[in-house]
Amino acid sequence: MLYISGSIFACTLILVFTRPKGLGIGYSAMAGGAVSVLLGVTSLEDIVRVMYIVWNPTLTFIAIVIITMVFDESGFFTYVASRLEKIAGGSPIKLFVLIILFGAFVSAFFANDGAALVLTPIIYWVLSSTDIPRKSYLPYIMAVGFIADTASLPFVISNLTNILATSFFDIHFLQYAETMIIPDAVAVLTSLAVLMAIYGKSLPATFTTVKSISQEDTIKDRRIFRMALPVLVILAVIYSIGGIYSIPVAIFAFPGSIVILSIAWQGKKIDTIRILRESPWQIVLFSIGMYMIVYGMAEQGLAAMAADVLIRISAIPGPLNLVFSGYFMSALAAVMNNLPSIMLGNLAIKSSGLGIKYVYVNVIANDIGPKFTTIGSLATLIWIYTVKKKTGITISWKYYMGTGFLMALPVLTATLLALWAESII
């Protein structure tokens, strides 16, 4: 039966990545899930368990994306990016560093998908207002796409995989943040160092602004614009308090997104209908469908196999047990996509009886590991498409995977070592 479930999974991924006749990725995954049920790989009881597991992550993810899109439409991100260009003072290297740090901030508070997809066209627009040669745009674009994932560790809401892992193991907001703040800081600093090492010499010596950017060019809805930072603070406090009482993040995030969307609708300056229409509903269907398939595969023995590998690795002394476990989980994410792999990792860790630190290893691996390949995360595939559509810059799979490996491996290793060091202090 494992061979059958594996075949269903492989065929579903092929449909997802090839998208025949423009078929939505969510429909492909749901079709695969339906076949898994019809062939007896996944039971109706499994579906109930999957829905129980994914309701909080799914609603939280949608809420964060809606909030991000509303603030993006208000001009918040564009305004900040334009200010960074002025702060850089004609230094391309300084602008490069500022963009990376801004990307890390957006990824932490608005999730990795929002950071990559929202910031990419904005950064391109800012670069277009300078005399930086178009051939030098690629380092900035790649930096945004890379930091969006590697800096998505600090909070539960920073990445859908974080939400899935913490929901599965009932890890509350503050408990998670307390553990992951230091590894995230290491990930951001290592990412900055690696990106500078790879792209630093290709940046021009200086730049000048050829098109002045005013507030009128950037801010579309001042009321929503002014709400951005206060809303972030309020939500962070509410998430923290809710975590103490084991209240799921979605209980606060989803109603909060509806309130913000309603305020934007009343202002009539933001197209809220378009925001709802362009929200990632296909990713919601994709996650549900893939979890139906993966849960069935896990029940047929795949989770036990992964657990056995983790148990063997855990016997290695020193930091290597966490590092090699992270490599193993990253390989799964890079090959099978991080949404199904985070679920498999959760089930394997639960089956193996390994400690909670392996949950954090699983999160790190599924946040950073997908950068090894273009299929490692849906965000990467959508980002590559967005880059080509919005900027005209084509990033080949060969270039991305070669550069991605060079960038991701040292960041992944340093972050896992930071987690290990934190666990023994």
Image (tube, rainbow, N blue to C red):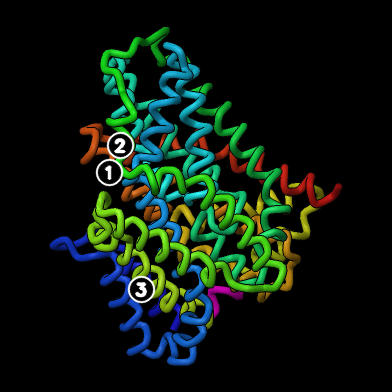
Q: On screen, 89 above or below 56?
A: above
Q: Residue at x 32, y 71 (%)?
A: 29
Disc with the residue nearer the chain's start (2 vs 1): 2
Choose between 23 and 15: the one closer to the eye: 23
**Residue numbers of the magenta segment:** 300-304
Can residue 86 be seen from the camera position used here? yes
Q: Residues within 10 Å of mark 3 (few under 14, many from 20)?
A: some
Q: Residue furthest left?
A: 21
Residues at marks 1 and 3 touching, judged by CB atoms closer than 8 Å: no
Please provide percent x and percent y for residue 424. Answer: 84, 50
Which residue is denoted by mark 1 in the rendering?
386
Disc with the residue nearer the chain's start (2 vs 3): 3
Please provide percent x and percent y for residue 220. Answer: 30, 41
Disc with the residue nearer the chain's start (1 vs 3): 3
Mark 2 and mark 3: Cα distance apart in space: 38 Å
Q: Marks 1 and 3: which is nearer the front?
A: 1
Q: What residue type is labelled 1?
A: Thr
Q: Residue at x 46, y 69 (%)?
A: 255
Residues at marks 2 and 1 touching, judged by CB atoms closer than 8 Å: yes
Which residue is denoted by mark 3 in the rendering?
7
Q: Residues within 10 Å of mark 1 (few under 14, many from 20)?
A: some
Can residue 300 be seen from the camera position used here? no
Which residue is denoted by mark 2 in the rendering?
121
Q: Residue at x 31, y 69 (%)?
A: 12
Mark 2 and mark 1: Cα distance apart in space: 8 Å
Please name the predominant secondary structure of the magenta segment in the image.
Answer: helix
Q: Which amino acid does label 2 sit on?
A: Pro
Choose between 323 and 25: the one closer to the eye: 25
Mark 3 lies on a secondary structure that is: helix
Horizontally, residue 325 falls left or right of residue 204, namely right
